[in-house]
Every structure is written in C-alpha cells, then in structure tokens.
Image (tube, rainbow, N blue to C red):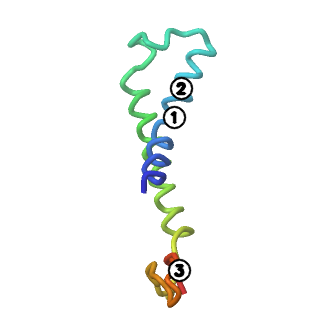
Amino acid sequence: MIRTLATEILLFATPFALYAIFLWATKADIIHPDSWPLSRIAALAIVALLLVIGSFLYFSHYGGAPPGSTYVPAHLDEQGHFVPGTTR
C-alpha cells in the first residue's frame, strides 16, 4: 500500500519538479513568486492530476488478479509450513 501511495505522490510532484529544473536551467529565480504565476501552477496541477488519474486507470486495468480468479489466503499446510496467499 505504501508503494502505491508513494507512486501517486511521485507522479503528482513530477510536473512541479520538472518546472523547477527548467527554472534552474534557465537561471531564473526558482523561489521568487514571479516565477510561479497562478496560471502556471494551475496548469502544472492539471497535468499532475492527469498523470495520477492515468496511473489509477493503468494499475486498475493491468494490476491485480485476473478476472474470475479466486483468492486463497495465506495458511499453514499439514506439515506446519507457511503457504503465502495466492490467486487461482
């Protein structure tokens, strides 16, 4: 669960980090408020949300168990060995 959350946070922060790198590369003042107009922040936020929504769609479509499978929870077998959870 933490990996999924970290992935989404990283995807959301990527456009802002790329813009900060662009400002640094062009020798602009990164911290100055004039470098971060509200329209630019709104555009970066929209791109960030599109990346997050796209990743949600990707992970929901290509991640997880195949359709029609049954989850078998983790258990101990007859010899007392741990058997991890699987899908069948």
Q: Position of residue 11 (x, y in %)?
A: 50, 43
Tag 3, which secondary structure? loop
The residue that label 2 is drawn on is: 19
Q: Secondary structure at mark 1?
A: helix
Q: Nearer the viewer, mark 3 or mark 1?
A: 3
Crowd class of label 3 (few under 14; some 14 to 19; many from 20; radius 10 Å): few
Looking at the rendered image, the disc whose residue lies closer to the viewer, 3 or 2, is 3
- The residue lying at 46 percent from left, 50 percent from top is 52
Alpha carbon of mark 3 to alpha carbon of mark 2: how far? 52 Å
Residue under pointer 1: 15
Nearer to us in this view, 74 or 23: 74
Q: Position of residue 70 (x, y in %)?
A: 47, 87
Q: Are marks 2 and 1 in contact (CB under 8 Å)?
A: yes
Q: Position of residue 58 (x, y in %)?
A: 53, 62
State the residue at coordinates (51%, 75%): 84
Reading the image, the residue beneath label 3 is 81
Where's residue 35, x and y in %?
A: 45, 15
Where does the N terminus fall, quadrant-wise?
Answer: bottom left
Q: Amino acid at mark 1?
A: Pro
Give the amino acid at mark 2: Tyr
Q: Name the residue rendered at 44%, 80% in the picture.
A: 73
Q: Is residue 33 above or below residue 7?
A: above
Q: In this figure, what is the number of numbered marks?
A: 3
Tag 2 secondary structure = helix
Q: Earlier in the sequence, mark 3 or mark 1?
A: 1
The residues tagged by marks 3 and 1 sit, at their Cα atoms, a distance apart of 47 Å
How far is mark 2 from mark 1, CA to CA?
6 Å
Mark closest to the chain's N terminus, 3 or 2: 2
| Residue at x-position 54% and y-position 87% | 88
Q: The disc labelled 3 sits on which kind of residue?
A: His
